[in-house]
Image: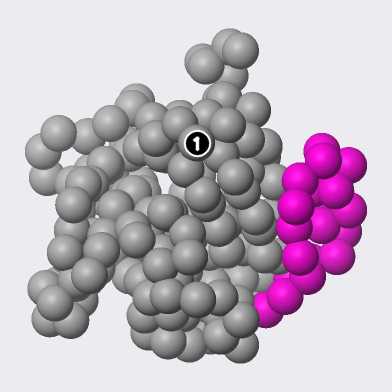
Amino acid sequence: MNYDAIRLDHRIILEMVPRGSSVLDLGCGTGELLFLLVKEKGARAQGIEIDEQAIYKCVARGLNVIHGDIDTGLSEYRDKSFDYVILNQSLQQVEHLEPVLMDSLRVGRKVIVGFPNFAYIGSRLQLFFGGRAPVTPSLPYTWYETPNRHFLSISDFTGYCRKRGITVERRHYIGNRGEVASFPNLLSRSAIFIISR
């Protein structure tokens, strides 16, 4: 497999998940990440997706994906029934962020959360100089098309975890040219965290 052809956030998550782990991907889309986890890590993986067209693409890849709305909860899953629950680029799109996150922490031993950083300098400059809602590579939608409901920054998320007693185990910050080492809230387009309780 050509790892350079894989999206950077997917490569980071692939590196985070140990071989043979059980994984639940919430809002798995067309299953690109789920497919990589099964193929490269031998993950026992399941996805939940609301978009029926995306589910068809998952099924065509041979993935176990069910139709569901993660906003309605994960009550059918037992506590700690998965090693990892993944919310990559989906947490900011749910209607009820806190219940979804708390349910994910209940169902998974660890939760991987990836989201666009709304405090990225490119977004700030567009808003400041252009006076318009920003459109960037990590926020590719205009204000009237965006599926995002929650506009959070890296600092917002780390503050939320601290306030709720959620442990941040690892974090990766993604910028224009790879991972960002300093001033992540300013220079990162997106972030990926491993969290647990």
Residue 125 location (% of width, % of height): 30, 54
What residue is shown at x 52% (from left), y 51% (from top)? 23
What residue is shown at x 62% (from left), y 63% (from top)? 27
Position of 162 with respect to 1 (left or right) is left
Q: In the displayed image of the protein, which residue is found farthest to the top? A: 2
**Which quadrant is home to the N terminus?**
top right
Indicate the secondary structure of the residue bearing disc 1.
Answer: loop
Residue 55 part of the magenta segment: yes
What residue is shown at x 42% (from left), y 75% (from top)? 79
Asked which quadrant contains residue 172, the reply is top left
Report the amino acid beneath label 1. Gly
Residue 174 location (% of width, % of height): 33, 39
Position of 184 with respect to 74 (left or right) is left
The one of 197 and 123 positioned closer to us in this rendering? 197
**In the figure, 12 relative to 89: above or below?**
above
Residue 22 location (% of width, % of height): 51, 49
| Crowding at mark 1 (Cα within 10 Å: few <14, some 14-19, many 20+) | some
Residue 24 part of the magenta segment: no
**In the figure, 84 relative to 71: above or below?**
above
Q: Which residues are magenta?
A: 50-69
Labels in figure, total:
1
The one of 52 and 152 positioned closer to us in this rendering? 52
**In the figure, 61 relative to 59: above or below?**
above
Residue 108 location (% of width, % of height): 41, 64
Judge whether residue 89 can be spotted in this image: no
Residue at mark 1: 20
The one of 152 and 161 positioned closer to us in this rendering? 161
**Which quadrant is home to the C terminus?**
bottom left
Judge whether residue 29 can be spotted in this image: yes
